[in-house]
Amino acid sequence: MKTLRRLVVPVAVLVAALAAPATAQDGPPPETQESPEPVDEAGPGSREQDPPPAEDAPQTGEPTVENTGPTPEALAAWSAIVGATTIPGEHQPITAFDLTADVRASQGAQTNQLSVRYRFLAPDFIRFMISDERETGRGPGKGAAAYWLRDGERITQLVGRDYKPDRDLVRRMTTIAQNVVALTDPARLTIQGLELRSAGPPFLPKSLAWYRDRLTWVEFQSPDFDLYRDEPRLDGATPQNGAPNPSPETPPDSPEPPVLPTDGEKAADPAPKRMFRVLVGADRKTHQPVLVALREEGEPGKRLGEPLLFELKDLRAVNGYYLPHTIFVRGFAPDQPVFQDDPAQEIGVIGASLAPKLTPADFQP
């Protein structure tokens, strides 16, 4: 039974780079209206209280506010990044794209090189070539039955536990595509806690450490991104020590495997909305993004998405956006809270359309 197991790592993060922000809208994000917070009138014990003021201290009735919203400097930095990544009057909201790229993927001493064509239509239709004869994706349908593999003239539905690695590959590529859409239109993002950082983060690898003091760093949280994480168990069991849950298994004699909720489908008991922390390092002269780090927020021990760091180069105009055509992708180093020094993937975009005319029928196998 043929699967794509050997291609899961190299291809999965392959277009991850394309999630790097070839971003933005030509206007600044909506201004945040500041309003004074009301005086906390909660009773004793409701939360930690500030020490009472001295008797002779003036009573102004104004609370101490630690964070009233983005500073003017943070808003100005973000607006500059947004304005530097689009061409005024030429871009439209992205709902689909068609990309071709050469990819060099490294894992340990092994290196793979391949060319990939990658097509996407919101919310979750996707197809991509993994060789001259083989293509996989997700088309119209429900659950696992929507996933397929074409090998020459042979078409296989990726249903059942034996095809979990193949579905995982498609899911990885779908989350990447959703990040592309989110990052290309940042004015539509739901942003919380926009801040201007004085220096770069400590988790940069040594090869990129010199960027810490040479870029403008903007950080925020948003639910409008995605990172790959393993399929949840159908029994809802909690992972131990943060390890991914094992995939659900279908008994050998079962004629129909379990149908998993997939991208765009709601489970019977929806999970809490995921939140992601995004850190953008932009060139101080051009204001175009150079580094983008994406991590999922969550409690220790919870199953979180895999963090990614994108290094973006050679931005070129495509359908009103500046799309990076050379991209280096890094994951976290094993057992270390820093990204890997050497890129796991090197992507060179050959051709791109951010406005192809695609319909759901184009994603049938």
Image (cartoon, rainbow, N blue to C red):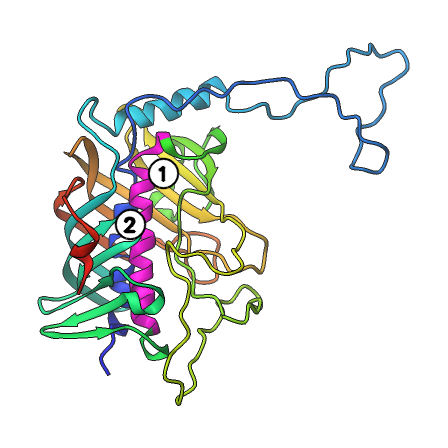
Tag count? 2
Q: Secondary structure at mark 2?
A: helix
**Residue drawn at (33%, 59%), measured in percent from left and top?**
172
In the visual, does 182 lie left or right of 87?
A: right
Residue 346, image x, y percentages: 22, 53
Q: Secondary structure at mark 1?
A: helix
Q: Which mark is residue 54?
A: none
Residue 76, image x, y percentages: 40, 20
In the rendered image of this protein, does residue 76 appear above or below residue 324?
above
Q: Which mark is residue 210?
A: 1
The span from disc 2 to disc 1 (Cα, nearest Å) is 30 Å
Residue type, mark 2 in image: Ala
Residue 151 appearing in the image = yes
Magenta span of residues: 164-187
In the rendered image of this protein, does residue 200 appear above or below residue 128?
above
Quadrant in which residue 289 is drawn: top left
Identify which residue, 171 or 305, lies in the foreground.
Answer: 171
Q: Residues within 10 Å of mark 1 (few under 14, many from 20)?
A: few
